[in-house]
Image (spheres, coloured by chain):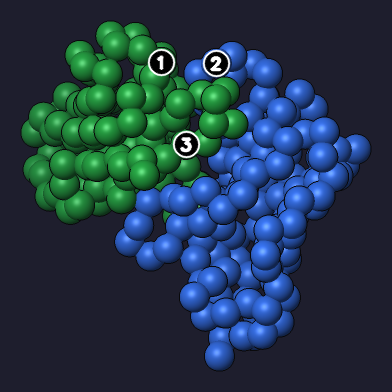
Amino acid sequence: DVKVTQSSRYLVKRTGEKVFLECVQDMDHENMFWYRQDPGLGLRLIYFSYDVKMKEKGDIPEGYSVSREKKERFSLILESASTNQTSMYLCASSLGAASAYEQYFGPGTRLTVT
Amino acid sequence: GEDVEQSLFLSVREGDSSVINCTYTDSSSTYLYWYKQEPGAGLQLLTYIFSNMDMKQDQRLTVLLNKKDKHLSLRIADTQTGDSAIYFCAERNHGSGNTGKLIFGQGTTLQVKP
């Protein structure tokens, strides 16, 4: 079974803090994704990575950066957290065509910025 | 641009059938997916359909695809209280290359009343 883990289920940070959200997958997947989920807006793609050290902006990259130094790990960084970044953050990984591009999701991190 | 639309809420009685609908705009969609999110959890793939298919059935789930109208539906027969969750429609199109990038709808909250 594919397992995607995220470093925290719940996180509370102050405005202006630097925040790191970590995601690890154990299935040697090439592609990894970071989404934020807000009620009524569904999942919005922040960044994705299709290989080590490769990244592409998604639909809402402003205020975020990412790092992928190892294949299994994809980190989301909030350089200076703001209250409008309070949200649920979901990480996913995908093998690609070999598995019909299915994405496997972690349990999510609920981040509150006060 | 690419867009996937769903209604936000559906309420049914236990034992009835549920039908969750989704429309998409991109005619080059290759795969269409239904994901389920239970409270406090990440998304889990329920089923997917390739764009050259009209229907797919898997136990209590039936997926219907109308390519002409760009309409996808998920029917759950004999809906149970355990089916209460958020259901996301997603699509992948040719423009995604091999990255596995998907476009998600807003999610439909299914409430099953006993």
Relative image position of residue B68 (x, y in whole percent):
90, 38
Q: Amino acid at mark 3?
A: Gln
Relative image position of residue A67 (x, y in whole percent):
23, 18
Verify CB contact (< 8 Å) between mark 2 and mark 1: yes
Q: CA distance from mark 1 to mark 3?
A: 13 Å
Chain identifier for the blue-coloured part of the image: B
Q: Quadrant location of the N terminus of chain A? A: top left
Q: Secondary structure at mark 1?
A: strand
Q: Nearer the viewer, residue B13 or B55?
A: B55
Q: Amino acid at mark 2?
A: Asn
Q: Is residue A112 visible?
A: no
Residue hosting label 3: A103
Q: Is residue B52 left or right of residue B23?
A: right
Considering only order in the chain, which callout, 3 or 1, is on the residue closer to the N terminus?
1
Relative image position of residue B82 (x, y in whole percent):
49, 75
Residue hosting label 1: A50
Q: Secondary structure at mark 2?
A: loop
Residue shown at the point (16%, 41%) measured from the top left: A7
Q: Residue furthest top?
A: A53
Q: Is residue B15 left or right of residue A60?
A: right
- The colour applied to the residues of chain A in this rendering is green
